[in-house]
Amino acid sequence: MAKLFLIGFMGCGKSTIGKQLASKLNYNFIDLDNFIEQENNLSINEIFENKGENEFRKIETNALKKIVSIPNSIVSCGGGTPCYYGNVDLMLNNGTVIYVKMSAKMLVNRLINAKNQRPLIQNKNKEELLEYVSAKLTEREIFYQKANYTVKGKNFDVNEFATFLADNI
């Protein structure tokens, strides 16, 4: 009845890795943002625009509380999820937390072409984006480092990690 929570900055590959791990381990895959969108009949962007970030974080926490009861699941969390309302402790108390780590520069290279779908970065140029990502990454690192395991998002070997998880969780 294991639960795995993937945390890390937006764009680090949590959803991609989560889907692949879920397939290898025969687990359910849950993308927290998609879950929130379905529950609220609004996109993440619409929630941010209509209700603001603070209300979004409350909605996010409530969604996470619902998800922790789903057995044999891999949950891809939003980049800020572990940083609010004790969410990182909720995850640690209900499963195994894996931090998908990536450098600010690499994150910016991944995010620059997808920034319009991400409300916190949509109006930033590359320089502003690097500044924002670097600052946020530094701010969030204290939460990310609480994870049970840290893996590198670049050149991630899903097969190797799935074997490790199967043997250790």
Image (spheres, grey):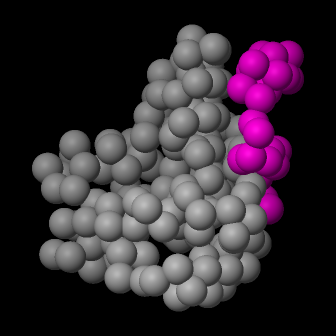
Using residue 82 as the reference point, say whether residue 93 is left or right of it: right
Identify the image quadrant of the C terminus. Answer: top right
Residue 144: x and y in percent read: 72, 62
Q: How many labels sit on residues? A: 0
The image position of residue 12, as x and y in percent, is 62, 53
Visible in this render: residue 55?
no
Left or right: 37 in relation to 76: left
Task: Tell me: residue 117, above or below residue 38.
Answer: below
Q: Nearer the viewer, residue 103 or 25?
A: 103
- When the figure is inspected, residue 122 is found, relative to residue 162, above or below; the finding is below
Task: Confirm whether residue 80 shows in the render.
Answer: yes
Image quarter in which the N terminus is found = top right
Q: Determine the residue positioned at 51% across, 40% down.
A: 15
Question: What residue lies at 48% left-to-right and 22% top-to-bottom?
Answer: 28
Between 139 and 102, which is closer to the camera in this rendering? Answer: 102
Relative image position of residue 63 (x, y in whole percent): 37, 50
Q: Quadrant of residue 141?
A: bottom right
**Is 111 inside the magenta-drawn segment?**
no
Question: Which one is in front, 2 or 137?
Answer: 137
110 relative to 130, above or below: above
Q: Viewed as shown, does residue 133 lie left or right of 125?
A: right
- Answer whether residue 153 is magenta in the image: yes
The residue sitting at 46% across, 83% down in the picture is 125
Return the x and y of residue 30 as percentages of the image width and height.
Answer: 44, 34
- Tell me the magenta residue range: 145-168
